[in-house]
Amino acid sequence: MFESVADKAIAISNVSNGCNEVRNLQKVVFNSMSIPKVSEKNSMPALSVKNVSKHVALDGRSLEILTGIGLEIKQGESVAIVGRSGSGKTTLLGLMAGLDTTSAGTIELMGHQLENLTEDERAELRAQYIGFVFQSFHLLPGLTAVENVMLPLELLKQEGAEEKAVELLNSLGLGEQLSHYPQQLSGGEQQRVALARAVIARPTILFADEPTGNLDSSTGAEIIDLLFEYNDRLNTTLVLVTHDEALANKCQRQVLIKDGKLVDRHSNSSESDNDEAVAEEVLEGSIS
């Protein structure tokens, strides 16, 4: 019925009136590419966030979500964004991934200033550089596990999508679940499929929003190991939002967001007692 997984995904998203990202990505991929690929030099930051603020209108007033955020993340670095619920962590992640736009300030992703790009151009940039792992998985329910993983490669018109997806899912222990639909998979299996989909195109930056939030501790530990395996083996920049202390402690750096402001940042590499105390305070959200 469908010539490709991409055609099937677009048809499903049209029927459900959802999955805008699928439709936007399909539109920009099959049009002429307008964003030149920046030479990926190690000296270039993966992300540069300068004085970024985000506010929304609510009941006739302006609600400040983020204020004056400044942050630079190097290529290949792993960074955990921590803080209490409602502090603005996920909003910042979405802004850095180009899923939303800033109210003030600038964000550069691999040398591209996001504020200068249209919505379609930002979708194109995500296809070129970004993988995203969501807490709630966001798998397409009408596609099998292997079809969900094939989708990014098919939308990018890369050959061998099925072979590469099967190989990757086999490496994640999902060889028996290739033809299963998301509703037939456990939470851990769904997150492994989502992770495979995020890394199949070898992104420069991997964003993860509470990737272990819906998983038990054992399954969560497996996902943590996989995230850092890709970070180490492929030199993928890893930026994640988490309440998981074990996950945050494995990152090279932690950044604390409190009441919409960046109030602390520190490296996990120091072994001093003082740094260990600060790390505990960061994860508890108790630094004022």
Image: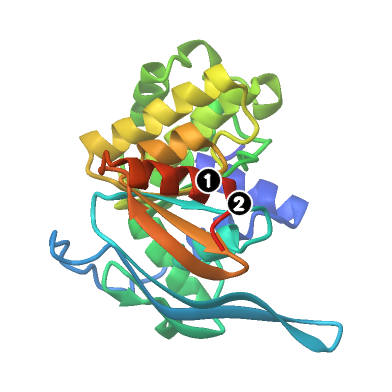
Colour option used: rainbow
Q: How far is disc 2 from disc 1 in space, using C-alphas?
A: 41 Å
- From this viewpoint, is residue 123 visible? no
Are discs 2 and 1 less than 8 Å apart at CB?
no
Using the image as rendered, state which of residue 61 and residue 137 is in the foreground.
Answer: 61
Using the image as rendered, state which of residue 224 and residue 142 is in the foreground.
Answer: 224
The N terminus is located in which quarter? top right
The C terminus is located in which quarter? bottom right
Q: Amino acid at mark 1?
A: Leu
User: Which residue is label 1 attached to?
Assistant: 283
Q: Earlier in the sequence, mark 2 or mark 1?
A: 2
Question: Could you tell me which secondary element the residue under label 2 belongs to?
Answer: helix
The image position of residue 178, as x and y in percent, is 52, 19
Q: Residue furthest top?
A: 176
Q: Residue furthest bottom?
A: 60
User: Which residue is label 2 attached to?
Assistant: 10
Q: Is residue 234 above or below residue 285?
A: above
Residue found at x 65% / y 32%: 214
The image position of residue 142, as x and y in percent, is 67, 36
Which numbered disc covers residue 167? none
Q: Residue furthest front?
A: 273
Question: Could you tell me which secondary element the residue under label 1 belongs to?
Answer: helix
How many circles with numbers are drawn on the protein? 2
Q: Amino acid at mark 2?
A: Ile
Using the image as rendered, state which of residue 194 and residue 10 is in the foreground.
Answer: 194
Residue found at x 55% / y 16%: 177
286 vs 26, left or right, is right
The image position of residue 129, as x and y in percent, is 33, 57
- From this viewpoint, is residue 176 visible? yes
